[in-house]
Image (cartoon, rainbow, N blue to C red):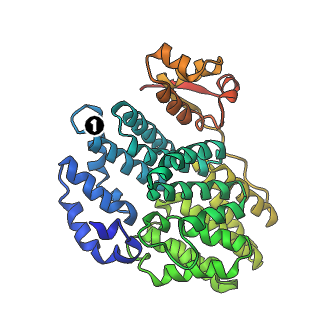
Amino acid sequence: MTQTFGDPARTGAAVLPQLTEMIATVGDDPTRVIRVGTASVFVDRLGDFRWATRRLVDQGRAGAAPVRRHLGALMHLGLDYFHLGRWDDAAQLAAEGLTLCEDHDYRFYAWYFQYIQAAVAAAQGDAETSAALTEQIIRWAMPRGTYGARSFACHARALAALGSGDFETAYQHACTLSPPGTVAPYVPIAMWGTMDLVETAVRTGRVKEAAAPAAAMRESSMAGPSPRLEMLVVACEALTTPGEAGAALFERALSLPDPERWPFDVARMRLFYGERLRRLRAMAEAREQLTQALEAFQHLGAEPWVTRAAVELRAGGRSAPAAARPRAVALTAQELQIATLAATGLTNKQIAERMLLSHRTIGTHLYQIYPKPGITSRAALRDALSGLDLHAEED
């Protein structure tokens, strides 16, 4: 269904009844599951038949589904999990997909999985890993004219720059994804970057540039396909509306159906709302929103946003709650073996020779391993292995 994939900000809402019928009759044919999934990605309907996508992943792992369909299911489930805040699961599915791409020479699909990993790393504050992954996407995509892949890379790059507080760089990446004044047509991921664009325009003093995309979103049909997209539209309007009128719009955005389903987006909105309330001197209400945002960011492991929420809470006269206790870090037996060998100083090629794997597979696993103990490089592995509660889980 091209209307929900090609230009969903303008044509997606009109065909939702047909998509609903397709989802209700999706069945178990791998090709149909992937086609319906592709039609569902940008209108947030993947969760309506997650069971079918999960089953296809299981079939692929058992060798009972074509590799291309297995890859498609991993992509869809990984994107779904990212928006649901299940970032560890999303990154693990992406690592599985990259290994499949390498083993079966499906290089074209690899950038989807690199994007998922880059987005997770960006949201968690691992700018180094995110930058390395997006650079791989760009190096592969640009000589081939694959501008869709570049758009995904720009989204992850904007998110990483936002996390590091580099609002000017984040603005430039967000503009590459979707120039101010429009929700870029036929760039469906532009909808996901709208709040990044408006926030960075506001924070860099570009009042007109912030108002233009907010108006474009309002004039499009972007709010129609899903409550999450409607939340983004209303939140962007709130960011560009001063005073109490803007605060009322934040309240409206957070009152849409089932907001906590999208924890990262909603936590960011609560942060914005809390900042606005603090400036309006509504201190008790501001602290409530900021505390909820902080707790959500801590649960997600979104460290840059934890810091931002804590700073706002202190500015509002309250110390931030104690940081959440670090979780035990679970690695699969294979990941633990790779991490241990890498910590001794062996290269990817040397590790690959010992484990009878390719050096690219080792590199993929290391990208997956680093975020778990909160590190960004091989050099930090030894301390992580000795200083954290690392243990092996079943493969």
In the image, residue 183 above or below residue 170: below
Badge 1 is on which residue?
60
State the image coordinates of residue 308 (x, y, percent, origin top left).
Answer: 72, 58
* Depth order, front residue of 97/104: 104
State the image coordinates of residue 218 (x, y, percent, origin top left).
Answer: 49, 82
Relative placement, left or right, of 315 versus 54 is right
- Three-letter amino acid code at disc 1? Gly
Instruction: Tell me where residue 7 sits by quadrant.
Output: bottom left
In the image, residue 374 above or below residue 152: above
* Depth order, front residue of 66/271: 66
In the image, residue 104 above or below residue 238: above
Q: Is residue 26 visible?
A: yes
Q: Is residue 317 visible?
A: no
Looking at the rendering, in which quadrant would you find the N terminus?
A: bottom left
Q: Residue at x 49, y 19 (%)?
A: 352
State the image coordinates of residue 105 (x, y, percent, origin top left).
Answer: 35, 35
Q: Secondary structure at mark 1?
A: helix
Q: Residue at x 74, y 77 (%)?
A: 282
Q: Residue at x 40, y 33 (%)?
A: 102
What is the residue that sits farthest to the front in this orientation?
A: 143
State the image coordinates of residue 313 (x, y, percent, origin top left).
Answer: 75, 62
Instruction: Tell me where residue 20 sits by quadrant.
Output: bottom left
- At label 1, counting other C-alpha atoms closer than 10 Å, the crowd grade (few under 14, some 14-19, many 20 or more) is many
Relative placement, left or right, of 17 versus 8 is left
- Count of marks placed on residues: 1
